[in-house]
Amino acid sequence: MPFSEAFDPIRSFKAAWKLLKQAPLSVLVGALLPILAQVGFALALDLFLFLPLGLSQSFQRGMPEPWMIALLVGAGLGLGLFMAVFSSWMDAGFGRAVEQALRTGKDQTSLVFSGGGRFLTLLLARLLVGLIVFACMLVLLLPVLLLMTVFLVLMQTDLPALLKLAVGGGISLLWMLGYVYVLLGLSLVTAIVTYEDCGPAQAVARSWRLARGNRWQLIVFFLFQFAMVFVGMLACGLGWFVAIPLAEVMRYEAYLALTRSSEYPNWWVVTGKFPFDEHKSESFGSAPPPVPPPLPPQT
């Protein structure tokens, strides 16, 4: 399937919606559990650690004890590390559950918790992505600082305020475009690590190659997801519990449609047919083997 078709947001949304109705437990648990866990652990830290220390006399006087600051920083870093590990484990398992449900139409929630084989690679890949983004932002910051120097000089002149505002906005836009360009090139790393037998560096390189020449399509795809989640938030917040899972399924489904193009047309999500024997059949959705004709009667 061509990239433009695989990452067509309308096509992917329809497939994700079909999957949500067919396998709701796998989709909802895999997409929402990491978010709910993060909120729960953050609230627990606020109630049992951050709030009591914040109300202490040392903090009230603006002179907290060194051990208090160390405890708060350590707790924050520990929570961040735990959530990075937990979300990587869950995302790898969620990707497997999505693929299996797309293939067979079966709601196998246990697969959501089966990401142990790929979660370490995914965690390392995400750390690598973070380092790459940070390094790129530092590189992009140098020309931006030069342009900002020019902008500060212009601010001291008698040029119209609208022109000064346009120059400042243009500088910010250039930095943002560079940031978005890098993020789009790395946006497929999670799906690649989940479905391909590769290391973190290979996943980053493959994501960059796939995004080359397709960034506009990725922009349309992600803007559609953003709009969908935003509309879900407006629906009294309840639509969030549907929009987020749909967006999470779409990022996996689109990659599978792109890279499994020879198999995808035979999957349940396309044919609507359940596999006759998912353990023995190599091609899901294929017809059962023909029944041999009866033997002639013995004379």
Image (cartoon, rainbow, N blue to C red):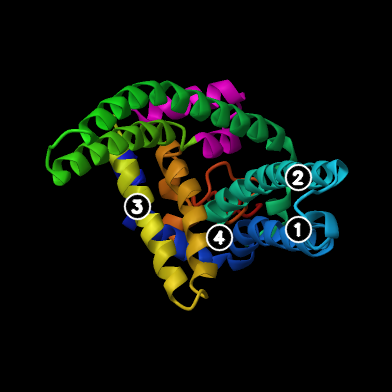
Q: Residue at x 48, y 60 (%)?
A: 246
State which region is magenta.
189-212
Residue identifier under label 2 = 82
Q: Residue at x 58, y 56 (%)?
A: 276
For marks 3 and 4, the one nearer the N-term is 4
Look at the image and tell me whether residue 291 can be seen: no
Name the amino acid type tagged 1.
Phe
Measured as percent of width and height from the top left, residue 182 is found at 41, 30
Q: Quadrant of the N terminus?
A: top left
Instruction: For marks 1 and 4, give the CA distance.
Output: 33 Å
Name the amino acid type tagged 4.
Gly
Residue identifier under label 3 = 223
Q: Please report contact status of discs 4 and 2: CB closer than 8 Å, yes or no.
A: no
**Which of these two is toward me, 168 or 270?**
168
Residue identifier under label 4 = 105
Name the amino acid type tagged 3.
Leu
For marks 4 and 2, the one nearer the N-term is 2
Q: Main secondary structure of the magenta part?
A: helix
**Which of these two is toward me, 64 or 82?**
64
Instruction: For marks 1 and 3, give the CA distance.
Output: 30 Å
Measured as percent of width and height from the top left, residue 14 is found at 39, 61
Measured as percent of width and height from the top left, residue 89 is found at 70, 44
On screen, residue 291 versus residue 124, left or right, reads: left
